[in-house]
Amino acid sequence: MNLRAIKPPHETRTRILDAAEELFMQHGFEATSMRQLTAQAGANLAAVNYHFGSKDALIEAVFRRRLDAMNAARIAELDRMEKDAGARALSPRQIIGAFVGVSLRMIEDSKSGGRNFIRLLGRTYSDPQKPIRALIGQLYAPAMERFKAAFERALPQMPRDELIWRMHFMFGTLAYTLAATDTVQLIAGCKPEDRYDARLLEARLTAFLHAGLLAPLHDSADVKKAA
């Protein structure tokens, strides 16, 4: 028996996840076949079934592998900043930076698949499949609650329902930014090398989100009257 030809189980699992991530990003979830997946991963269908059991379970594993770590990093960064601030509330800009910075830095990661995943994540936000969108919401929930509490402390004067809406708009803007990294050049005429410069993108996006978060509160009576 050629022992060198035997791949460790964790290596096979990683190759399947890497292949699924890339193919889902390129073709979408429905259009990616198991034949394509096994060919890309250099594994057979039995190996896919052994490690994941089903395509739905594989999709969940693809997202959990990255999102669990991403959201843990976001919360850890927020914890660090709050510890440094002591009894003082963080500024809204600091909280925004802690949330968007981790995902934007993955745009620069082309070697270990971070950029592929970010593009997949952006594609998912516009994907009509409700189960996948529900999964993303479930994985994000603990981090979103943690950041909402930080925003409530930073902006005690803002009504809770208004804060939730503004966080929704912020999240949507980030999602579009992640999905549209290849089209930004066409829209804005920016330099190609700027599309994947996380520091420039983070500075621009943070400034934009900060301005939106602190925009004057609307008068609901005036809005209803205008409608």
Image (tube, rainbow, N blue to C red):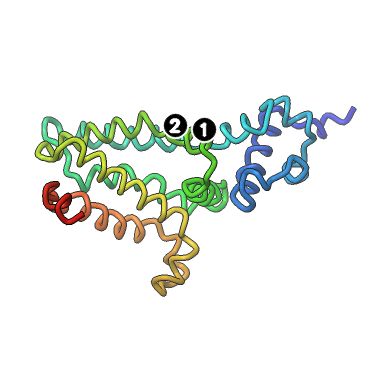
Q: Position of residue 105 (x, y in %)?
A: 42, 50
Q: Residue at x 43, y 38 (%)?
A: 70
Mark 2 Cα-neighbour bin, 10 Å: few <14, some 14–19, many ≥20? some
* Mark sitting earlier along the chain (1/2): 1
Q: Residue at x 43, y 72 (%)?
A: 191
Q: Is residue 43 left or right of residue 63?
A: right
Q: Quadrant of residue 47?
A: top right
Q: Residue furthest right?
A: 1
Q: Quadrant of residue 195?
A: bottom left
Point out the image quarter for the C terminus: bottom left
Q: Quadrant of residue 69?
A: top left
The foreground one among 86 and 114 is 114
Q: Label 2: which residue?
A: 139
Q: Give amino acid for label 2.
A: Leu
Q: Residue at x 46, y 36 (%)?
A: 136
Q: Give amino acid for label 1.
A: Arg
Q: Position of residue 72 (x, y in %)?
A: 39, 32
Mark 1 Cα-neighbour bin, 10 Å: few <14, some 14–19, many ≥20? some
The foreground one among 216 and 82 is 216
Q: Label 1: which residue?
A: 64
In this rendering, which labeled residue sits more in front, label 1 or label 2?
2
The foreground one among 4 and 190 is 190
The foreground one among 132 and 44 is 132
